[in-house]
Image (cartoon, rainbow, N blue to C red):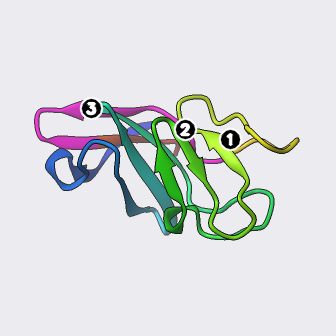
């Protein structure tokens, strides 16, 4: 495992999301009250890009089929699927965001 530098914390305001690419995988980073959460950009229900959805508090809603997920746990709020892929630890160290990459 290694930490990978993925973004500047100042690039993603509270209540907003950002899209980064980590080892050719698109990952969404959500800023929920100053804590950062990262997860796969693809909705497991419809395979739509989640970064095009909306973030309200800690819940992201897919723009395609309105499935919603708690970004802090990856658990669904509307369907029987979970958004677990690439959801994982991020670390805000100073002004940078880091992601754990399994190698």
Secondary element at tag 3: loop
For label 1, the residue is 84
In this rendering, is residue 75 above or below 11? above
State which region is magenta: 84-97
Is disc 1 placed on a helix, strand or loop? loop
Q: Which of the pair 51/99 is nearer the observer?
A: 51
Q: Which mark is residue 71?
A: 2
Could you tell me which residue is drawn at 34 percent across and 44 percent down? 15
The residue that mark 3 highlights is 34
Task: Provide residue 73's location: percent of width, then percent of height.
Answer: 61, 29
Residue occupying image coordinates x 49% and y 35%: 58
Q: Residues within 10 Å of mark 1 (few under 14, many from 20)?
A: some
- Residue 32, image quadrant: top left
Mark 3 or 1, nearer chain start: 3
State how far apart marks 3 and 1 are (Cα): 21 Å
In the image, taking residue 37 as reference, residue 86 lies left or right, namely right
**SS label for mark 2:** loop
Q: Where is residue 30 in the image (x, y as percent from the top left)?
A: 40, 46
Which residue reaches farthest right?
80
In this view, the mark in front (2 or 1): 2
Find out whether the residues at labels 2 and 1 contact each other: C-beta distance under 8 Å: no
Classify 62 as above or below 2: below
């Amino acid at each position: 495992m290694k930490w990978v530098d993925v973004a500047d914390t100042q690039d993603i305001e509270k209540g907003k999301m950002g899209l980064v690419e980590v080892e050719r995988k698109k990952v969404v980073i959500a800023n929920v009250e100053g804590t950062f959460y990262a997860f796969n950009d693809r909705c497991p229900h419809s395979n739509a890009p989640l970064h095009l959805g909306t973030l309200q508090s800690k819940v992201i809603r897919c723009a395609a089929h309105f499935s919603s997920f708690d970004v802090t746990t990856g658990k669904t709020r509307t369907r029987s699927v979970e958004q677990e892929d690439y959801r994982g630890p991020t670390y805000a160290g100073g002004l940078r965001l880091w992601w754990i990459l399994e190698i």
